[in-house]
Every structure is written in C-alpha cells, then in structure tokens.
Amino acid sequence: MSFIDDINKMMKGVRQSKMSIWVGMGLALLVTVSLTLAVQLWLAQVVCLLPILVALLAYYIPTYFGLKDRKRLAVFGLVLFLVIGLSLGSALYSTVANYEVQDVSSENNLLVGGTVSPSHVVPGDALQFSVVLTSGNNSSNVYLLLYNNWGEPADNPNYTMTFSPELSNNTSLGAVYTYSDSTLKEGVYYFHYGTLNGTAWTETPQSFGPVNADLNKVLSNSLMSRTVYSFYSMAVLFYILILLTWWMDRSKKKIFEMEQKRAQTKDKKVKDAKDEKFVCSDCGAEVPAEADKCPSCGASFEDDELKCPQCSAKLLKSDTKCWNCGKKL
C-alpha cells in the first residue's frame, strides 16, 4: 500500500469518527491562522491572494470533515476570523514592540549610516535622526523624509538636516547631518534620507521607525485594525461562498423535484392510457386499448376500428380523442 493510500485510509477513518467535525474545525483554524501569519510577515508578495485562500480553506476543510450545516459553519466562521484578526494584531504589535532600527545607505554610498535614536519613545520625547554624507561639505542640502504609518500624517514629511561638527569629528566617513525633534505627532514612522547635489537627487531605502506612541495604544490599535481587516477582506468572501453553495444546492433540489414530478406525471399518463377501455363494435363488450381482438366475441380489429365509450362513434385505435364528442382516449 502506497503512502497516499495510507493517508486516504487514515482520513477516511477520521471522517467516520465522532470527533470528525471538531477535527475539521481545529484543522481549519490551525491552517488559516498559520497561512495568514506567514503571508503577512514573510510572503507579502502574495498578500492579494490571501483573502481568497483563507475563505476557501475556512469553508472546505470543515465541510470535508462533515460540517454540512451552514448555520453552524457561519457561527464557526465568526470565531475563526476573530482568532485570525487577533493573531494578526498580536503579531503586528510584537513586530513593532521588538524591532531594532536598521541603518540605511544609498546605493552609491553617498549617504551612509542613516539611523534614528532612540527607537521607542512617547510623544514629547526627543528624537535624533542622523546620516553621514561621504562626499560634500557642511553646507550641502541633506533631507530627512518621514512618514507616519499610524495616526495622523505629518504636515510636512520633509525636514532639512543640519551639519554636526562634533559628530563629524568623531568619524572618518564624512560630514554628519542631524535633525532633532520632540514635537512629532503620535504614530509609527518610516524614515529615509535624501540629498540634492546640483540637480542630482540621491536617497536611501526606507527603514522602519521610530515608534512615537504608547505601546499599550499600539497593541489596542493593532488588535482592532487587524480584526476589522480579517472580517472585511476574508470573512466577506467566506459568507459569500456559503450563500453561493446554499443557492446551488437549493437549485439542484428544485431541479430534482421537478424531474420527479415530471416522471410521475408521465407514469400516470401511461397508466391511464393502459386503463382506457373501448367498446367492441360487434358485441358491445369493453375492450382494452391495446387489444387486437375482442376478448368476449373474438372479433378482430384488423381495421383498427373501435367505438367511443361515451358516444359510440367509430374510432381508430390510433385516435387520441373522439372526433364526435371530444373525449380524450
């Protein structure tokens, strides 16, 4: 027996057990939460496919293990997407709370060692941004570009940096430029640096930080925003899938009922046709519609001629109704 056969046998045994529905719900929870965290944290390039994948897995894994009741499936979905949202929020908070500032440098190394200190503050605390200009002088144009990813955006994301002689004397890399601020709005920021040398613009990649907010607020905001994201992007597709499958099953049931009714009507017509009686034109005895001769007097119906049981008009065996009185045969 192959490995696949062993897996199929095991799955069949699980599906036939009393705990199969609970196994399906637990497996769906584990798979969807793991997939969501993996995509959000490490596979951002496929994040657009995440809601569809999660909705499909959340529906088909439990139904595969026997959860066919759509009301129970809908209730399970509420719990599932709440857990997904809280898991995402917790992961986001952990990333923000434990991040370390990464220095940034431009590709041509004109700007190197761009950083911010400290990495975590609360509104009102002083922050110092610094970067080293390797080619230039103390009057070069160097800028800090700062973006708030949480909270109100900055009124002006571009800040002019100033030359720092003290820090420049302590490094052999070049001129150190700094920008200090204690008035930044509350938020979680991204920063990078740029310099304008004549008409040539050079900038560093973007780096995460600083966090200028109370971490308790960051936690509550992360949990709420990720839960909302879970419901409006994933749960909506999940419940649409439930409605679509319910409509398809309902349509199939209606079609089956119509076919059954049509078959019953056809059988009734055949039975009625078999039960239809004619009158022998010789002796007046009742004759079954399919008879070739009278069962009473033995008269042959070679000419296919019979009489209407209602008005005694002469008929052919192929007639479906009487030409005289209109009785259906």
Image: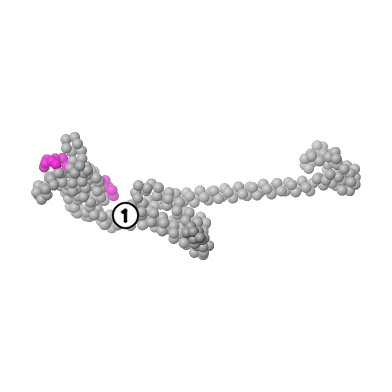
Q: How many marks?
A: 1
Q: Is residue 143 magenta?
A: yes
Is the residue 308 above or below the residue 122 in the image?
A: above
Q: Is residue 63 left or right of residue 38?
A: right
**What amino acid type should be assigned to the residue bearing mark 1?**
Leu
The residues colored magenta run 135-153
Residue closer to the observer: 140 or 234: 140
Provide the residue designation for mark 1: 92
Q: Is residue 51 left or right of residue 120?
A: right
- Residue visible at 47% across and 56% down in the picture: 61
The secondary element bearing badge 1 is classed as helix
> In the picture, residue 82 is in which quadrant?
bottom left
Observer able to see residue 192:
yes
- Residue visible at 37% across and 51% down in the picture: 229
- Residue visible at 85% across and 40% down in the picture: 302
Give the residue furthest to the top: 199
Instruction: Find residue 113 and report its horizontal and vertical position in percent.
Output: 18, 48
